[in-house]
Image: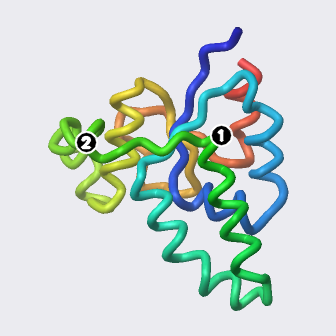
Amino acid sequence: MNNKAIVLDANILIRAVLGKRVLELILMNASTVKFFAADVAYADARKHLPPLLEKRGVESAVAMKVLDSLECIVQPIDLELYVGMQQQALRRIAIRDADDWPVLACSMLIGCPVWTEDADFFGTGVATWTSDRVELYFAE
């Protein structure tokens, strides 16, 4: 049994709904990797997806069900669990994007990397994987 874990940023949740590759990566590795996301990452995805879906002419209700179904695999982490890491996370990321502190705090709490397409996480002291490289982490 593999004990790998990774925290997903909101942009990865959005990519899982809009595209095929990210969703495939999650589903293919769900038996060996524990996937997590800060509760606010789900909230951000729910906020940003409808206009993106509208631009693409995609039925919003169906796509949002995909996001909802991800919660069975990508476990949301409630604020009360990671809020204790807020100050430490802000010290590491505030200069780049203070709004990203919950994702970083979850990563620090669990002791695992972040999967993101956001360069703001680089240099924060946690491993950061992008979609084009995350398979290397899963395969280690």
Q: Quadrant of residue 55?
A: bottom right
Q: Quadrant of residue 50?
A: bottom right
- SS type, badge 1: loop
Please tell me which residue is depicted at 41% across the width and 26% down the height of the picture: 110
Please tell me which residue is depicted at 48% across the width and 27% down the height of the picture: 112
Q: Nearer the viewer, residue 132 or 61?
A: 61
Circle 1 crowding by C-alpha within 10 Å: few under 14, some 14–19, many from 20? some
Question: In the image, is 18 to the left or to the right of 12?
Answer: right
- SS type, badge 2: helix
Q: Nearer the viewer, residue 39 or 72?
A: 72
The residue that label 2 is drawn on is 80
Q: Position of residue 21 (x, y in %)?
A: 82, 53
Q: Position of residue 54 (x, y in %)?
A: 69, 89
Kindly identify the amino acid type of the residue bearing the numbered disc 1: Ile
- The N terminus sits in image quarter: top right
Q: Which numbered circle lies on residue 105? A: none
**Residue lying at the far top of the rendered structure:** 1
Kindly identify the amino acid type of the residue bearing the numbered disc 2: Glu
Please tell me which residue is depicted at 36% across the width and 56% down the height of the picture: 100
Question: In the image, is 130 to the left or to the right of 27?
Answer: left
Q: Position of residue 19 (x, y in %)?
A: 79, 64
Q: Position of residue 118 (x, y in %)?
A: 51, 57
Q: Which numbered circle lies on residue 73? A: 1
**In this picture, is 51 found above or below 104?**
below
Q: Nearer the viewer, residue 140 or 27?
A: 27
**In this picture, is 23 found above or below 135?**
below
In space, the residues marked 1 and 2 are separated at their CA atoms by 20 Å
**In this picture, is 3 found above or below 83?**
above
